[in-house]
Image (cartoon, helix red, strand yellow):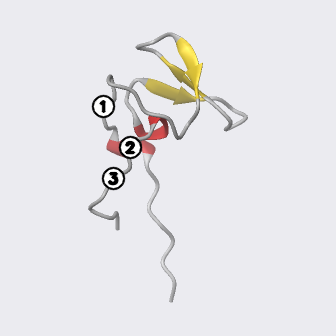
Amino acid sequence: MFSKEISKICAYCEHSKMLASGRAVICNKKKELLAPNGVCSSYRYDPLKRSPAAKNG
C-alpha cells in the first residue's frame, strides 16, 4: 500500500495542518506558515496524513 521510503515533508508531520488552499501548512511547533514539501528538525511522522497510491491495473 505504501512505499517503504517515506519523504520527510511538512505535509506528513504531526505538528502541521494543511490550509484549505493546499499551498501551505501551519506548523503548530514553529507557529508559522511553511511549504507542504518543506521539512524541519521538529519533524514527526503522522501516518494518518498520507493517502495510499492509486493502483494501476
- What x and y, as percent, mark residue 25? 57, 28
- What x and y, as percent, mark residue 12? 42, 40
Q: In this rendering, is residue 32 above or below 54?
A: above
For the view shown, which residue lies furthest in the right direction? 21
For the view shown, which residue lies furthest in the top direction? 31
Query: In the rendered image, which quarter is residue 24 located in?
Result: top right
The structure residue drawn at horizontal position 30% and vertical position 58%, both measured from the top left corner, is 5
Give the alpha-carbon distance from disc 2 to disc 1, as whole Å.
Answer: 12 Å
Mark 1 vs 3, N-terminal side? 3
Helix, strand or loop under label 3: loop
For this view, does 23 lie left or right of residue 42? right
Residue named by callout 1: 44
Residue named by callout 2: 48
Q: In this rendering, is residue 8 above or below 10?
A: below
Quarter of the figure that contains the N terminus: bottom left
Of 31 and 50, the residue lying toward us? 31
Mark 2 vs 3, N-terminal side? 3
The structure residue drawn at horizontal position 55% and vertical position 37%, both measured from the top left corner, is 36
For this view, does 12 lie left or right of residue 23? left
The structure residue drawn at horizontal position 49% and vertical position 38%, both measured from the top left corner, is 11
- What x and y, as percent, mark residue 40? 39, 27
Q: Amino acid at mark 3?
A: Ile
Give the alpha-carbon distance from disc 1 to disc 3, as whole Å.
Answer: 12 Å
Q: Amino acid at mark 2?
A: Leu
Query: In the drawing, what numbered circle is on residue 6?
Result: 3
Q: In this rendering, is residue 25 above or below 47?
A: above
Of 14 and 33, the residue lying toward us? 33
Q: Amino acid at mark 1?
A: Arg
